[in-house]
Image (cartoon, rainbow, N blue to C red):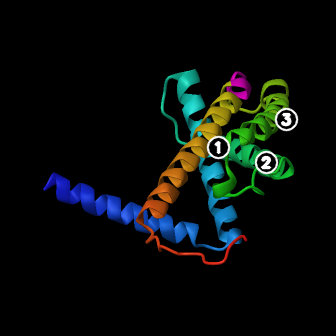
Amino acid sequence: YITIIKYYLKLIINSLTYSILNLPRFFKIILIILVDISLCIFTLWFSFFLRTEQFIYLLGDYLFLISISITLMLPIFYIFGLYSSILRHTSWQTIVPVSKSILLYTLFFFTIVTIGGINNVPRTLGIIQPIMLYISVVISRVIIKYYLNTLSNNKIKTKKKFRALIYGAGE
């Protein structure tokens, strides 16, 4: 039963991935933006856990912090071109713009959270969250690149190759 479940799960994931790859560019950008927003929210939540050693609900005052974080992140990522090279063009060179964008994000976020201060928010969150956001964004881009390379290699292997004879080429 386990091998059957693995087979169908792999089939579902591959068909979902191929359907995502066939989406128009605009929808791919929206999908990546949603992934980045969810990573931002998750890193905020996990940063709270690391700092306070308690799981908290991100409600009330924390919604303000989430809105600040997302409002800072999206324009900075857009300015540094993280959404211009979509999925297939992700490579190790994208780590440099990610690093620059997170550095600028850290500067603004640190200023707001640590220097400005927000109610019920530990000041060290201004350092912990950007570090975790950097790690999670880089890892997500690397995983996407690895997975897409694997898919494209499988696609190339499964394509039918036709034999062709070229007559008259040259002298």
Which residue is pictured at 69% across the width and 62% down the height? 29
Residue neighbourhood size for the residue with mark 2, other residues' Cα within 10 Å, grouped as few (<14), some (14–19), many (≥20): many
Which residue is pictured at 49% across the width and 67% down the height? 18
| Disc with the residue nearer the chain's start (3 vs 1) | 1
Quarter of the image where one finds residue 105: top right
**Would you say 157 lies left or right of 42 here?**
left
| Dot in front, 2 or 1 | 2
From the top left corner, tell me how far across and down residue 115 is, in percent: 84, 24
Q: Which mark is residue 104?
A: 3
Which residue is pictured at 54% across the width and 54% down the height? 148
Q: Amino acid at mark 1?
A: Cys
Q: Amino acid at mark 3?
A: Leu
Q: Secondary structure at mark 1?
A: helix
Instruction: For marks 3 and 1, give the CA distance.
Output: 15 Å
Q: Which mark is residue 40?
A: 1
**Would you say 130 lies left or right of 21 here?**
right
The residue segment tinted magenta is 122-127
| Dot in front, 3 or 1 | 3
**Would you say 55 lies left or right of 107 here?**
left
The answer to whether residue 107 of the structure is visible from this angle is yes
